[in-house]
Image (cartoon, rainbow, N blue to C red):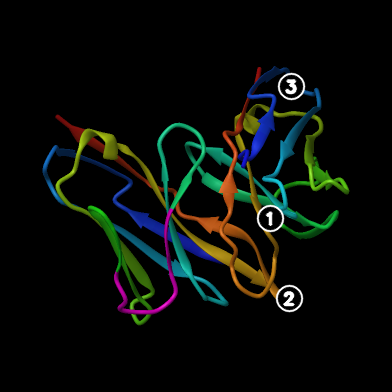
């Protein structure tokens, strides 16, 4: 079974631009979560999508948005990039979002550098 | 706001040593705690703990949860250079009827010197 894939793996942008990152979950997984990882703040939850609906959102500004498609693939968009948005963006998929925790499988991440 | 704190933030030991990594949490709706190992990019799952006092073991790694103390430890015995990694502790967030997303600690950066 193929793992979680993320594209692109590396991205360099300049301040003020916008960026779209893509995540393809493990086949059969319907939940996709996004995280931002920086040396100072560690791994922080951005948002989670399940069946094309955003179920929860972390403490990030509205410049960070996402969506999920009917095939469970998800995209994350960051508009008006700031230097502080430079980070590793990780996507994780799980089977569902039921009452019990379902193990999340992480993708390799997209390394975003904002100049 | 849920909070997960790990200590130490970094640790350098020699091969063969035993290490203990700590994780404490303050969460509104605790049900489980997870440990991950992150070597290069993707964190990989190690353990999930739900019951206090029950040790989970996998080879040289073991972990235990103490719900009274709101904490967990991860032990690695007879360390090897391949154990060098960032070890992350996380607690699932629960809202409504289900779990969504994880709250992570900042991690312990473990370096094993030959």
Which residue is tagged 1?
A58
Q: Could you tell which of marks 3 and 1 lies nearer the N-terminus? A: 3
The answer to whether residue B1 of the structure is visible from this angle is: no
Q: Residue at x 45, y 54 (%)?
A: B105
Q: Residue at x 27, y 35 (%)?
A: B82
Q: Which residues are magenta?
A: B46-55
Q: Comparing marks 2 and 1, which lies closer to the viewer?
A: 2
Which residue is tagged 2?
B96
Give a yes or no on whether discs 3 and 2 share a subunit. no
Compared with B19, A110 (above or below) is above
Q: Residue at x 59, y 67 (%)?
A: A101
Is B81 part of what is drawn in magenta?
Answer: no
The dot on residue A15 is: 3
Which corner quadrant of the image does residue B57 belong to?
bottom left
Q: Which residue ends up furthest to the right in the rendered image?
A: A70
Mark pair 3, 2: CA separation: 37 Å
Q: Position of residue B12 (x, y in %)?
A: 20, 38
């Amino acid at each position: 079974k193929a793992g979680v894939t993320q594209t692109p793996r590396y991205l360099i942008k300049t301040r003020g631009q916008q960026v779209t990152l893509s995540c393809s979950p493990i086949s059969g997984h319907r939940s996709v979560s996004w995280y931002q990882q920086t040396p100072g703040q560690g791994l922080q939850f951005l948002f989670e999508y399940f069946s094309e609906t955003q179920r929860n959102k972390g403490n990030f500004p509205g410049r960070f948005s996402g969506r999920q498609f009917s095939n469970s693939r998800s995209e994350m968009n960051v508009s008006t990039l700031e230097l502080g948005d430079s980070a590793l963006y990780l996507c994780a998929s799980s089977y569902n979002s039921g009452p019990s925790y379902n193990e999340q499988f992480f993708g390799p991440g997209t390394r975003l550098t904002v100049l | 706001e849920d909070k997960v704190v790990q200590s130490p933030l970094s640790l350098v030991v020699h091969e063969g040593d035993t290490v203990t990594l700590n994780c404490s949490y303050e969460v509104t709706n605790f049900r489980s705690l997870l440990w991950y190992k992150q070597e290069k990019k993707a964190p990989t799952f190690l353990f999930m703990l739900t019951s206090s006092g029950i040790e989970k073991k996998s080879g040289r790694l073991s972990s235990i949860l103490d719900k009274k103390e709101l904490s967990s430890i991860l032990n690695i015995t007879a360390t090897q250079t391949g154990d060098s990694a960032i070890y992350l502790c996380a607690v699932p967030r629960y809202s409504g009827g289900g779990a969504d997303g994880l709250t992570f600690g900042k991690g312990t950066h473990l370096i094993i010197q030959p």
